[in-house]
Image: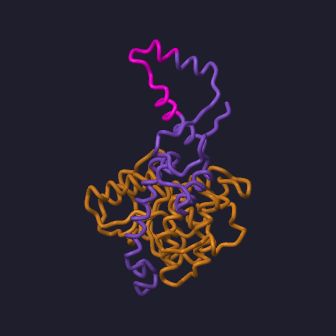
Amino acid sequence: MASEARYPILADTSSLIAVANTAQWKLLKDVIHLTTTNVCKHELQNHVNSNKYPPEGSREHYLKQGSQRVLEHLDADSSPWSCVTVVPRPHGPDAGEQSLKQELSEHASSYQIVTILDSAARRSIRRLIDDNGYDIDVVGPPYLLYILLDNDLIEKPEFCEATVRMIQTEGWTGYEVVKNAWTSIPVDCSEILDDEYDDAFPPK
Amino acid sequence: MPLHAEHQCMSGSSYDKTIQFRAGAEKEAAELLDEIHIGGVNVSELARVGLVEMLRQSLDEQDKIAVYERYSRGEIGEDVARVLLGEKLDRMEEEKESFEAAMERDTSEFLTGSDGE
């Protein structure tokens, strides 16, 4: 069962689903400490319960499979991930984002990184951080894979394959975070990846 | 309604280039509004703003990625990319800055092995 410890990385629902659907999931889940909120956990449970048999390859299947993996991991004995309870519990479509904000407002000093998939939510949390002068960076989920790369736990081709998956499933939302990771590192994934991933890139 | 640009160009900043398209009732409607609206209407300005809006609406996810890829390879100018992507261009820059700031952290601290577990 996940503890209530606060690790330096705070992750939202979509970030967790994004990494859970990559080929690096089995490695990533055991070697990185991270924290999420009870509200994000509830969103994961909703994804699992909302559609019993989503067709393979559909977005619903992607959400359900990713959510199941994350929940199993959160509930595993001695999980290196934690789940903190946010009170009062926010509701509504942006409850996950609100729960991160509430958590940061009370425990900002515990965190160094916030990872969020949605672009608007990232900007909104950056504003909160800037307004309060917290020393926290807000990034997309490719950063979690970058941690593996930076610590020589994976090689560049594996990093490229895992991140390009986010472009394939998330379109521009994924591209926005992945492209910047590639540029910053820098790594030329379009050279490294083979034709199998052509659909993620427009023809040159 | 066929539309063709007279010049295919990298720069969208100069306003001496014209776009021509065939218009029937649309042209009459524009002329009518110019005539009856107090102060008239600037049809060129309306067309520019309307075109940008419709171009952006016409972009799908892959198109956006294609535009940014060409922009990042230096094949199209920022002004052209901005017509199509708008503030998404600024957001990309923000994302880059945030990612680079996060890269400066000691990522080994985030690993489970770092605390002796």
Magenta span dominant secondary structure: helix
Q: Residue at x 57, y 58 (%)?
A: B70
Q: Residue at x 56, y 67 (%)?
A: A19
Q: Nearer the viewer, residue A98 or A5?
A: A98
Identify the residue at the far bottom of this view.
Answer: B116
On the image, which quarter does residue A190 sit in?
A: bottom right
Q: Residue at x 32, y 69 (%)?
A: A110
- Is residue A5 positioned above or below A42 on the image? below
Q: Which chain is purple?
A: B
- Is residue B107 positioned above or below B65 on the image? below
| Residue B24, image x, y percentages | 64, 21
| Colour setting | by chain
| Residue A192, image x, y percentages | 63, 75
Q: Is residue A190 left or right of residue B34?
A: right
Q: Nearer the viewer, residue A105 or A23?
A: A23
Q: Nearer the viewer, residue A173 or B76?
A: B76
Q: Residue at x 60, y 40 (%)?
A: B6
| Residue A121, image x, y percentages | 43, 53
Does the magenta-highlighted stretch encompass residue A194?
Answer: no
Q: Quadrant of the C terminus of chain A?
A: bottom right
Is any part of residue A171 visible from this angle?
no
Q: Is residue B108 left or right of residue A190?
A: left
| Residue A67, image x, y percentages | 58, 61
- Is residue A24 positioned above or below B61 on the image? below
On the image, which quarter does residue A64 sit in?
A: bottom right
Is any part of residue A30 visible from this angle?
yes
* Residues rendered magenta in the picture: B32-50
Q: Is residue A157 left or right of residue A117?
A: right
Q: Which colour represents chain A?
A: orange
